[in-house]
Image (spheres, rainbow, N blue to C red):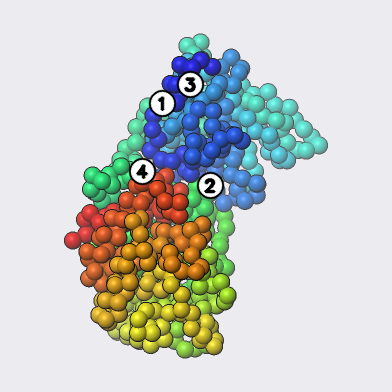
Amino acid sequence: MKHEAFNALSKKPDSIFNLSSGAFYRAGTYFGLCLRPLRHAYAATLGEWGSCRVFVCSRRGSIIKQKDNLLMELIPVKDGQRVPFAVSASASEFTIHTPCGNIRFCFAENTLMLVRGEGGLGLMLWQELETHRIIRKRGEKSWEFSFPYICSLVYTPQKGTVNAEISWNYEDLRSELCTAQIEPDETGEFEAAIEEFTHFGCVRPQYPAYDEGKRSAQEDFEEFLSKMPPVSEEFAPLREKAAYVTWSSLVSPSGRIKRTYLYMYPTMPASSWQMAENAVSLKNNLPLGIELLLTMIDRQAENGQLPDFYDDVRNWDRCIKPPIQGWALEILMHEHDLKAEVPPEKLRAIYEGFGKWAIWFTKYRDDDHDGIPQYEHGDETGNDDCILFRTYQKLELPDLSAFLALLFDQLGALAELLELPKEAKEWRERSRVLIEKMIAAFWNGKRFVGRTYGDHKIIDDTSLHFYRTIVLGKRLPQEILDQMAEDLSREGFFLTPYGYMAESLTAPNYSRSAFGRGAITPMDNVLVITGLYSAGKTELAKEAARRYCRGVLGAETPFYPAQAGFPASWNASAFQILSDLACNWP
């Protein structure tokens, strides 16, 4: 390869997202494109020349039936030979750059990807097929690649041809190794459609043109982006990237998923508390935010428990996440008239569903009947390796009582909107009583502490976890708020130039390599900083929010999980919420 070509590929266009942690999807899609590093490559260089391989991937739940989420490798070729390449991506287009020209991909629809190649380039479709996986001809020029537990992909050429020579292996009940290829026509160009099906595939009479498909995707993203809050010039470079991560993490209804749903990672659905967080980040897109709140109610157990998460084929019901839905409802109701803006049947579903969820804690998470609910695993805090659980599995912690009391209170507000005054009064009384019990059980005069389940042995660690209680805002006594704000304003205690750390730098259990023992965790920062704001500590809240966002912008510190690439949608939504607070909240 000539040095000139190497230099050209090294100067490829910037990507809208960090290719080392993301995948190329459109909102609503279940299949997309992703990269895997070559053996010698660093993850941080993924997308640069000679660093990676490109695959069609899936985020359907049935991918658990195989070792990874990769369906088929896509290899740029010319005259039958592999061509070195680099990769870049925008919201509407994924591009493979080669010395000969480019191969471009876009999503015209949720289930339809279009491909365009130039410069005599072809695209090899490579996959070693396992038992029951077959390739079959569809119509005169299309080929269907079947992945039995997951989906079918139909490749149809619009310009050029798709050629495959596949032999049948009866002993293994599969087609042999696939090395099919999309080949250019006499002009050196090709165009093709790749369509995903949950059943057997078929060929359309006509497909949209590539430019039309790309325009559709770009317009869809720009409409979504227009509803995200404006930010200052300082944080503007990440506004579009954060919006892309949220937008591309959305999937359409399929199987168990009955409405628009959100993924945390490219292959991992968001949990119940992340749905609430993202609903807040989408407060300027209220219909979508309400849909995200309703997703967990769709799979709610009869006794009121919400699932941790689910996808199109499976439920994760043996774990829960903190009940922060009251926190989300308070912010949304501050911004919107839910009675006027939300259809009555959806408002009623939220009220009834979250009401059952709240009562579930009083029935099934207060085994010693002292009025204080318990966590039963570190996973249930949202920070799986929370240091408070290093010795005990079951703990009574003040943040759970705070979240539940706030949910009681906001259920009272919803009851008022629904003209249920008696129920509103009952919810508000539950909230008042629980806050009183929480303070009596956990406030030691200087800070909140925890205690073990049963024997109530005091757990007194310097963990940011205890400061989540500030989500209650002015429902807490002023002296408690003042003391918590004083602690949260101390430089180097929890507060760093990049936001709040999960554990104090001076704590004996601090570890910058552990998520719940030293990292700057997105959700903790969101809850604590918005809590400071609701407590009237506006200046401190805005300064902490700015620091968090600057940390994301620079991603300079090794204990910072929310790097500029936004490896997960909850990182992106944390930036969206806190940049909005820093720039727009009065």
* Numbered badge on residue 6: 3
Alpha carbon separation for disc pair 3 and 4: 27 Å
First in sequence: mark 4 vs mark 2:
2
Between 445 and 189, the residue placed more toward the observer is 445
Report which residue position mark 2 lands on: 59
Report which residue position mark 1 lands on: 11
Alpha carbon separation for disc pair 4 and 2: 21 Å
Numbered label tally: 4
- Label 4 crowding class (10 Å Cα cut-off): few <14, some 14-19, many 20+? many
Looking at the image, is 462 positioned above or below residue 51?
below
Between 463 and 57, the residue placed more toward the observer is 463
* Numbered badge on residue 241: 4
- Label 4 secondary element: helix
Measured as percent of width and height from the top left, residue 296 is found at: 45, 63
Q: Comparing marks 2 and 1, which lies closer to the viewer?
A: 1
First in sequence: mark 3 vs mark 4:
3
Q: Comparing marks 4 and 2, which lies closer to the viewer?
A: 4
- Label 2 crowding class (10 Å Cα cut-off): few <14, some 14-19, many 20+? many
Q: Tell me the amino acid under the disc marked 1.
A: Lys
Q: Which of the 4 image quarters holds residue 78?
A: top right
- Label 1 secondary element: loop
First in sequence: mark 2 vs mark 1:
1
Q: Residue at x 54, y 72 (%)?
A: 389
Q: Tell me the amino acid under the disc marked 3.
A: Phe
Measured as percent of width and height from the top left, residue 519 is found at: 45, 59
